[in-house]
């Protein structure tokens, strides 16, 4: 297991624009493996490379069926909107109310550099947008409407 430390939003690395991945090599594959281990261990839905201190355009999204590896991803299409609670492994213990598209389609490269498209609704669309924002140094707290109160969080957990 290659667990990497998840940085909090106090770290400058989380506020920088990440560089594209150019080498689809063993080093990238090792990073993906470590990120996957770290994501599973954390119980989160997505993880972006800057959260483990690597300023490259790499994110993982757990769709519930598989862990998607998105290298150099971009948003191709969005539709509708949803307003709901959102959290981040780099902002532990807090949740905010964030407006996101209901549907999102992304284009990305896989670990070998092949381009593909992926799409999703609800939580997956939310996660695509949240993780892609990380690559541009944006944390959800900068785009949220407000933090959820402890009372609202208790209500959500029922
Ligand atoms: Zn996050």
Image (cartoon, rainbow, N blue to C red):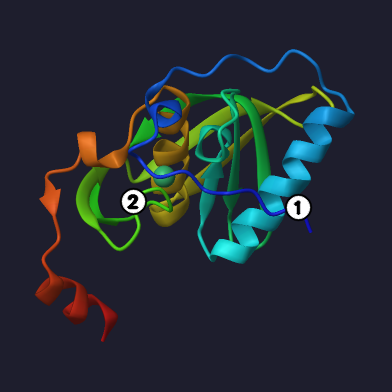
Task: Give the position of the C terminus as an image quadrant.
Answer: bottom left
Rounded to the nearest whole Å, what is the CA distance between mark 2 and mark 1?
22 Å
Residue at the image point whose x is 40% and y is 40% from the top: 130
Residue at the farthest right position:
26
Q: Is mark 1 within 8 Å of ligand 1?
A: no
**Residue 28's image quarter?**
top right
Badge 1: residue crowd in 10 Å (few <14, some 14–19, many ≥20) = few
- Judging from the image, what secondary structure is the residue with disc 1 in? loop
User: In terms of image quarters, where does ligand 1 lie?
Assistant: top left
Q: Is residue 39 left or right of residue 3?
A: left
Q: Position of residue 46 (x, y in %)?
A: 52, 50
Q: Is residue 143 left or right of residue 25?
A: left
Q: Nearer the viewer, residue 15 or 109?
A: 15
Q: Position of residue 45 (x, y in %)?
A: 51, 57
State whether residue 83 is above or below residue 110.
below
Q: Which mark is residue 2?
A: 1
Q: Is mark 2 within 8 Å of ligand 1?
A: yes
Q: State the residue position of label 2.
A: 91
Can residue 111 be seen in this snapshot? no
Q: Position of residue 5 (x, y in %)?
A: 57, 49
Q: Nearer the viewer, residue 121 or 99?
A: 99
Residue at the image point whose x is 33% and y is 38% from the top: 10
Q: Are marks 2 and 1 in contact (CB under 8 Å)?
A: no
Q: Which mark is residue 95?
A: none
State whether residue 112 is above or below residue 47.
above
Residue at the image point whose x is 23% and y is 41% from the top: 141
Q: Position of residue 131 (x, y in %)?
A: 46, 38
């Amino acid at each position: 297991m290659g667990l990497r430390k998840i940085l909090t939003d106090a770290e400058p690395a989380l506020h920088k624009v990440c560089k594209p991945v150019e080498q689809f090599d063993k080093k990238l594959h090792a990073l993906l493996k470590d990120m996957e281990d770290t994501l599973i261990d954390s119980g989160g839905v997505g993880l972006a490379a800057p959260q483990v201190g690597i300023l490259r355009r790499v994110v993982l999204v757990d769709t519930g069926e598989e862990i998607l590896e998105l290298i150099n991803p971009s948003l191709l299409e969005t539709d509708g909107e949803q307003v709901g609670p959102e959290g981040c492994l780099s902002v532990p213990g807090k949740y905010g109310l964030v407006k996101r598209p209901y549907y999102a389609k992304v284009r990305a490269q896989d670990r070998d550099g092949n381009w593909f498209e992926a799409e999703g609704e609800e939580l997956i669309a939310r996660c695509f947008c949240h993780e892609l924002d990380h690559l541009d140094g944006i944390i959800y707290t900068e785009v949220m409407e407000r933090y959820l109160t402890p009372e609202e969080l208790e209500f959500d957990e029922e």
